[in-house]
Amino acid sequence: MKPLSQDWLAELNLSPLWREREPVALAPSPASEGASATVIEVAQMDWAQLKQTVATCTLCPLHEKRTQAVFGVGDEQADWLFVGEAPGAEEDMQGEPFVGQAGKLLDNMLASISLNRSERVYIANVVKCRPPGNRNPEPAEAAACAPFLDRQIDLLAPKLIVALGKVAAVRLLGRDASIASLRGQVLNYHGRPLIVTYHPAYLLRSLMDKAKAWEDLCFIKRTMQDLQSAERTPI
Ligand code: URA
């Protein structure tokens, strides 16, 4: 296994600035034209049904301007789940999360702890469609998309969830708090370990916090090792 490396930190100095960025009935159901999938139906979907439902979702206004919904990417048996905020312009065009500048940084952060986006890692967002002008998703948009992320998490059953930034942290924890107050702890999403760290797009703009993000990555890696050794130890 490659040693932990801080190479990605150096790249922060080179990266261009990242640009600024209620209903309960859900998307039109692929099964029954004109009808809507309910939260309960979404909670029972398999991967294929869920992808199809997300691709055709018209639940919130974000669908109006999207090129495509951005479902998620990675290993569907992943131990690690990284959750971001919402697709940006590049993601909207390519249909894959974190492929722009912030994505390059996320890839470097993953590499620094010997991970990559296609092996044992899954990457998803709180909302699946790009908010115009890369603004933060509105709470109602995050709420409309919530059953989709919840179902992705159920299907994946990751060992560890990493919330990237405040939007993901607030959505998964169900409470408002600063990243500063949440980082460095193992929190809990529906009984699954959850760690909060800075969003890569924030790190592109806020070089002061890069050392803290590095501490978080080391903590994330150690926590996974602890979880894995606890699994191996018979009770
Ligand atoms: N920022 C996010 O939170 N998600 C993406 O997919 C891209 C940028």
Image (spheres, rainbow, N blue to C red):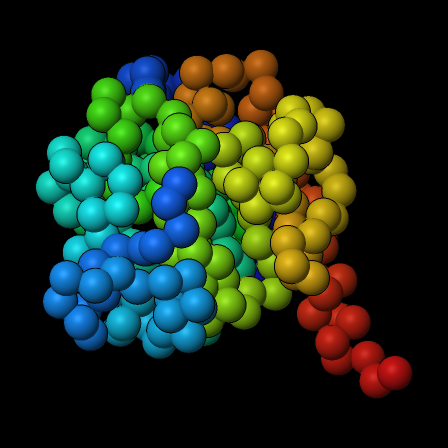
Quadrant occupied by the C terminus:
bottom right
Q: Is residue 225 left or right of residue 83?
A: right
Q: Is residue 223 visible?
A: yes
What residue sits 39% from the left and 57% below the top?
A: 148
**Residue in the foreground of this view, choosing between 169 and 229:** 169
Relative image position of residue 46 (x, y in whole percent) = 35, 76
Relative image position of residue 40 (x, y in whole percent) = 44, 68
Q: Residue furthest bottom?
A: 234
What residue sits 27% from the left and 40% below the top?
A: 60
* Above-or-below relation of 56 to 233: above
Q: Is residue 133 left or right of residue 85?
A: left
What residue sits 59% from the left and 20% below the top?
A: 209
What residue sits 14% from the left and 34% below the top?
A: 65
Q: Residue furthest right?
A: 235
* Above-or-below relation of 143 to 124: above
**Residue in the foreground of this view, choosing between 158 and 103:** 158
Q: Is residue 68 left or right of residue 193?
A: left
Q: Is residue 6 visible?
A: no
Relative image position of residue 94 (x, y in whole percent) = 16, 45
Relative image position of residue 102 (x, y in whole percent) = 36, 32
**Residue in the foreground of this view, choosing between 119 and 160:** 160
Label total for image: 0
In the figure, residue 213 lies in which quadrant?
top right
In the figure, residue 67 lies in which quadrant?
top left
Quadrant occupied by the N terminus:
bottom right
Q: Is residue 66 left or right of residue 224?
A: left
**Residue in the foreground of this view, choosing between 11 and 153:** 153
